C-alpha cells in the first residue's frame, strides 16, 4: 500500500535536515579544532544542536571578517547586504522550520527544538554589523560587542543543555551568569591571541584604548586578570550543568584557562607578534581530565 503523502513529506524533510546537520558538522570540523573536540564530549542530541548553532555564527563571521572579503574585497555595503539577508533568512526559517540554506535550516531546527530566544539572535547580528562599521571601541561599545558576539552564544548553547530540565530561578540565574562569563572569556582570549592581526590586517582594536602601539605588560596583566575573573564566575555554574553537557563545558573551560595561562606567561612584546596556541597533546590531556571528572576551580 502506498504511503500517505504527508508521511512521505515528513520523510523528505527528515532527510533534508540530516543533510543540513551534516553540513553544519563539516563547518565546525573545518574551522574550530578546539571547540570541535570539546563538542565531541556532548551527548546527543545536544552535540548536533550546538554544532548547528556554531555553523550559523561561523557563516555570519565569514561575511564580516573572512571568506566574503576574498570575493567582495572591501565592499562593506555588499557585505552588509549579505549579512542582512542572512539575518532575515534566519528569522524566517525559525518561523517556518525550513530554509533553502542548509546551515540556516539546521540552525532553525535547533532553535525550534530548544526554544532559542530571537533576542539573542538580534544581539548577535548587531555585533556582527559592528564588525563592518566600527574599528575602535570604548567601554560601552566593547561590552555591547562582547555580549552579542560571544555571551549570547553561551546562552544559546546553555538553552540546548537545559530547555527540558527543571531548575529554580536562582539556579537558572547562576547558569545564565556562568554561560555569559564563559562566552566572554572565550572572546577576550581570542582578542588577545589576535591583537596584532586585528590591528594590522583589519585596522581594528577591540579592547578599549588598546592597540599594538601601546600594548604593554601592565595592560596584558590587567586583561588576563579580567579573563581569569570571567572563568572563575563560569566555574561556579559547572555543577548545575546537566551531565549530558558538563564534561564538554569543563573541557572548553580548561582549554581556555590554559590559553590564558600561556598568554600570562608570554611577554607583552612577544604576544603582539605571535598567536598563542595549545598543542594537540595538551588538548588531549585536557579532554582526558574532563572525561575523568576534573573540574575547574
Image: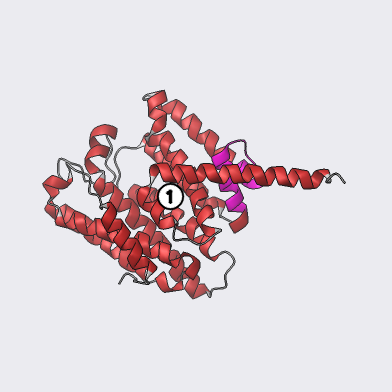
Residue at the spot of label 1: 148
Q: Residue at x 84, y 46 (%)?
A: 4
Q: Residue at x 50, y 66 (%)?
A: 244
Residue 206 seen by the camera = yes
Neighbours of disc 1 within 10 Å: few (<14), some (14-19), many (20+): many
Q: Residue furthest front?
A: 1
The image shows residue 82 at horizontal and vertical percentages of 50, 31
- Name above or below for residue 52 compared with residue 231: above
- Name above or below for residue 176 compared with residue 186: below
Q: Residue at x 29, y 62 (%)?
A: 285
Q: Is residue 274 left or right of residue 59?
A: left
Q: Residue at x 25, y 59 (%)?
A: 258
Most foreground residue, 142 or 192: 192
Q: How many marks?
A: 1
Tell me, yes or no, whether the highlighted magenta stretch contains residue 116.
Answer: no
Please identify the dominant SS of the magenta region. helix
Tell me, yes or no, whether the highlighted magenta stretch contains residue 107.
Answer: yes
Q: Is residue 63 left or right of residue 278?
A: right
The image shows residue 36 at horizontal and vertical percentages of 41, 51
Q: How is the image coloured?
A: secondary structure
The image shows residue 203 at horizontal and vertical percentages of 27, 34
Residue 234 seen by the camera = no
Locate residue 198: give its quadrant.
top left
The image shows residue 253 at horizontal and vertical percentages of 34, 62
Q: Which residues are magenta?
A: 91-112
If the image is split into quadrants, where does the C terminus sit? bottom left
Amino acid at each position: 500500500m502506498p504511503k500517505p503523502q504527508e508521511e512521505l513529506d515528513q520523510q523528505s524533510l527528515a532527510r533534508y535536515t540530516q543533510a543540513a546537520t551534516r553540513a553544519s558538522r563539516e563547518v565546525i570540523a573545518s574551522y574550530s579544532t578546539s571547540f570541535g573536540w570539546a563538542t565531541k564530549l556532548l551527548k546527543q542530541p545536544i552535540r548536533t544542536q550546538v554544532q548547528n548553532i556554531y555553523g550559523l555564527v561561523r557563516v555570519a563571521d565569514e561575511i564580516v571578517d573572512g571568506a566574503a572579503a576574498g570575493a567582495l574585497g572591501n565592499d562593506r555595503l555588499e557585505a552588509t547586504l549579505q549579512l542582512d539577508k542572512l539575518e532575515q533568512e534566519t528569522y524566517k526559517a525559525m518561523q517556518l522550520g525550513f530554509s533553502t540554506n542548509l546551515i540556516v535550516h539546521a540552525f532553525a531546527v535547533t532553535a525550534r527544538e530548544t526554544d532559542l530566544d530571537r533576542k539573542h539572535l538580534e544581539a548577535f547580528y548587531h555585533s556582527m554589523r559592528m564588525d563592518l562599521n566600527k574599528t575602535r571601541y570604548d567601554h560601552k561599545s566593547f561590552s555591547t560587542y562582547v555580549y552579542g558576539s560571544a555571551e549570547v552564544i553561551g546562552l544559546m548553547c546553555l538553552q540546548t543543555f537545559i530547555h527540558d530540565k527543571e531548575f529554580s530561578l536562582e539556579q537558572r540565574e547562576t547558569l545564565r551568569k556562568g554561560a555569559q562569563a564563559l562566552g566572554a572569556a572565550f572572546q577576550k582570549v581570542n582578542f588577545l591571541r589576535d591583537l596584532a592581526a586585528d590591528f594590522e590586517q583589519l585596522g581594528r582594536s577591540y579592547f578599549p584604548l588598546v592597540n599594538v602601539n601601546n600594548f604593554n605588560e601592565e595592560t596584558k596583566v590587567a586583561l588576563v586578570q579580567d579573563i581569569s575573573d570571567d572563568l572563575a564566575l563560569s566555574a561556579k555554574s559547572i555543577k548545575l550543568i546537566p551531565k549530558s553537557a558538563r564534561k564538554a563545558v569543563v573541557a572548553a573551560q580548561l582549554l581556555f584557562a590554559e590559553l590564558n595561562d600561556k598568554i600570562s606567561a608570554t611577554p607583552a612584546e612577544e604576544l603582539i607578534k605571535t598567536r598563542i596556541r595549545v598543542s594537540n597533546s595538551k588538548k588531549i590531556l585536557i579532554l582526558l581530565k574532563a572525561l575523568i571528572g576534573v573540574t575547574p576551580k
